[in-house]
């Protein structure tokens, strides 16, 4: 009868001591109801256990001791190691979330938008794409026209290579493989809009890539079926900086594998004005189902072609009298610069070679016809714009130049013509107002027993003043890919080769700096793309270079 009141008084005294001595025993209060250490102390008093009583008295002595170092408000923690912090975090999740949010947003709060914009504009393109995922503010800030203009005019961009038209498991998946040249890292971009499309050509204008023409199967969607296909007129525009797609105006003629050229023009340039006196004369003839000129009237084909070419070679001065075009005397800023896209040749809806050409103005979003290729020029296989002239190379080793400002074709007679193996298509490249060509030719062996000829890929440069070819360098790899893709970016020439050997498709990416006196080639990437691709990717691939 006397123990219960005593027990009650003892608890009251203990609570008083906690308040007087400034001690914190919240943990004992928390565990008092579930059998913690407080219950053990009370049971020791109830049943008279001297050991437990001595332990509780020792705790009292510790509570009454004064601290020698540290805070005077000492605590007795009966939790296991780390349990107190765990319980505190669980009961204060909202406070922790608020503190963390304030910590992450403190930079945005104190950093002005213009300073933040100057920091983000200096990021590499890969890091910039990751920065857009941080918050909505950064995404909106890095997608404004002002920010894109600052990045275009700055010196913080690096070259990127975009590989299109790959085939995987017999299916045109539409995947785009992008290579960051500075970091030598590959990235894969899923393009649903390109699924089932092949044999198209790509070209880069500013920060956009234009996908022109192409084919798609009519029987098996996505597969390369050359027996039953549809040739496209449509033009797609891909913007890697925003990962967005758009459609441009369709061409007048359906083409697959057209030859493309990009040219910068002055603001006062007018396609309509230049084409009024230079357009071909058309005759009233019926076109049923997109039939080409070849199948309309084969017996009068030569007469029609002669009538469509009213100019004669003697009427136009040869190219030696035409010096390389200098920059326009009228200076204009980058904001006012315009570009045009030219498409010539390719294969038509009936798989016939085309000699027609079209020019596209991105500002007006319209295509206009240009003069057809010169008579007996042959099938165009490569082309590039250099100094305002669109140079086109044919399979019969002939060169023609289209003057974009004046709107007519000029035959170009070069001596001597570089020897080449006709199974490999030559590629024209333009770097800083210099015209190059990559072709495969035979050379002598190394003199060992069983000497035989071997093929090498050589880089040639055309002297635009004297129209003579000069050998510049030799590609280090054997020419295994007959349809190798080459593009230029400032002083660098990039090449991608794919070929199948020992049952596996291999790929090599090389680079050549033409500004260097040595003009040496270097390997950027090996066997990182074509491991899972089909052999047909060697024929359908197309590449574009951008600075992002």
Image: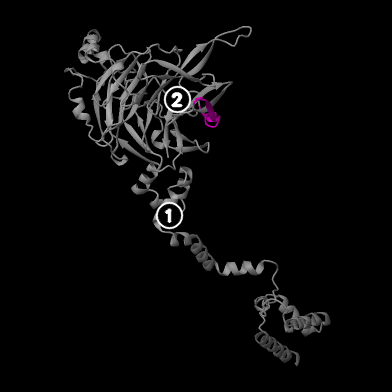
Residue at left 28%, top 37%? 331
Name the side, left or right, on which 194 lies relative to 311. Answer: right
The image quadrant of residue 383 is: top left
How far is the residue under mark 1 from the one under mark 2? 39 Å
Residue 529 is one of the magenta-drawn residues = yes
Tell which of 379 and 220 is nearer to you. Answer: 379
Residues rendered magenta in the picture: 517-533
In the picture, which quadrant includes the N terminus? bottom right
SS type, badge 1: helix
Badge 1 crowding class, 10 Å Cα cut-off, few under 14, some 14 to 19, many 20 or more, is some
Q: Position of residue 301 (x, y in %)?
A: 24, 10
Q: Give the residue at mark 2.
A: 485
Q: Residue at x 47, y 59 (%)?
A: 107
User: Depth check: 300 or 168 in front?
Assistant: 300
Estimate the x, y position of residue 46 in percent, counting from the top left. 77, 85
Judged from this view, the residue extending furthest toward the left is 284
Of helix, strand and loop, which one carries label 2? strand
Residue toward you, 32 or 153:
153
Q: Is residue 362 magenta?
A: no
Residue 320 x/y as whole percent? 31, 16
Label placed on residue 116: 1
Q: Residue at x 27, y 12 (%)?
A: 375
Q: Residue at x 42, y 48 (%)?
A: 121
Quadrant hosting residue 491: top left
**Mark closest to the chain's N terminus, 1 or 2:** 1
């Amino acid at each position: 009868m006397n123990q219960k009141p005593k027990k009650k008084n003892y608890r009251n005294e203990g609570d008083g001591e906690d308040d007087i001595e400034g001690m914190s025993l919240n943990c004992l209060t928390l565990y008092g109801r579930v059998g913690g250490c407080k219950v053990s102390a009370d049971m020791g008093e109830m049943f008279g256990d001297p050991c437990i009583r001595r332990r509780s008295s020792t705790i009292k002595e510790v509570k009454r001791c004064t601290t020698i170092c540290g805070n005077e408000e000492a605590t007795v923690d009966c939790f296991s190691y780390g349990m107190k912090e765990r319980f505190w975090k669980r009961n204060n999740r909202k406070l922790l979330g608020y503190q963390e949010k304030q910590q992450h947003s403190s930079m945005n709060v104190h950093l002005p938008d213009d300073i933040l914009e100057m920091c983000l504009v200096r990021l590499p393109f890969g890091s910039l794409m990751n920065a857009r995922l941080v918050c909505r503010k950064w995404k909106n800030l890095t997608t404004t026209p002002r920010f894109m203009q600052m990045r275009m005019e700055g010196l913080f961009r690096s070259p990127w290579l975009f590989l299109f038209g790959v085939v995987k498991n017999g299916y045109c998946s539409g995947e785009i493989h992008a290579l960051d040249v500075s970091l030598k890292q590959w990235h894969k971009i899923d393009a649903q809009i390109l699924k089932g499309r092949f044999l198209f050509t790509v070209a880069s204008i500013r920060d956009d890539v234009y996908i022109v023409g192409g084919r798609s199967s009519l029987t098996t969607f996505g597969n390369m079926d050359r027996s039953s296909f549809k040739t496209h007129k449509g033009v797609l525009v891909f913007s890697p900086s925003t990962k967005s797609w758009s459609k441009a105006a369709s061409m007048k003629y359906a083409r697959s594998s057209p030859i493309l050229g990009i040219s910068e023009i002055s603001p006062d340039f007018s396609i309509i004005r230049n084409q009024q006196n230079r357009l071909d004369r058309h005759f009233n003839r019926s076109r049923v189902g997109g039939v080409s000129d070849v199948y309309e009237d084969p017996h009068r084909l030569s007469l029609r072609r002669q009538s469509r070419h009213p100019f004669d070679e003697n009427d136009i001065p040869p190219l030696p009298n035409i010096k390389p075009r200098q920059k326009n005397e009228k200076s204009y800023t980058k904001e006012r610069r315009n570009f045009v896209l030219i498409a010539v040749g390719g294969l038509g809806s009936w798989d016939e070679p085309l000699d027609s050409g079209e020019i596209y103005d991105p500002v007006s979003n319209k295509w206009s016809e240009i003069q057809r290729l010169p008579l007996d020029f042959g099938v165009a296989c490569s082309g590039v714009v250099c100094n305002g002239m669109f140079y086109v190379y044919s399979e019969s080793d002939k060169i023609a130049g289209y003057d974009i400002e004046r709107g007519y074709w000029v035959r170009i007679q070069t001596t001597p013509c570089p020897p080449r193996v006709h199974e490999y298509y030559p590629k024209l490249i333009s770097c800083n107002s210099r015209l190059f060509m990559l072709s495969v030719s035979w050379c002598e062996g190394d003199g060992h027993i069983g000497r035989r000829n071997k093929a090498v890929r050589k880089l040639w440069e055309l002297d635009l003043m004297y129209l003579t070819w000069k050998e510049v360098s030799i590609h280090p790899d054997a020419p295994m890919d007959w349809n190798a893709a080459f593009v230029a970016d400032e002083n660098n020439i990039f090449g991608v080769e794919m070929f199948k050997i020992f049952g596996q498709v291999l790929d090599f990416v090389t680079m050549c700096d033409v500004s260097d006196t040595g003009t040496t080639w270097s390997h950027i990437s090996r066997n990182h793309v074509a491991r899972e691709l089909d052999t047909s990717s060697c024929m359908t691939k197309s590449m574009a270079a951008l600075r992002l």
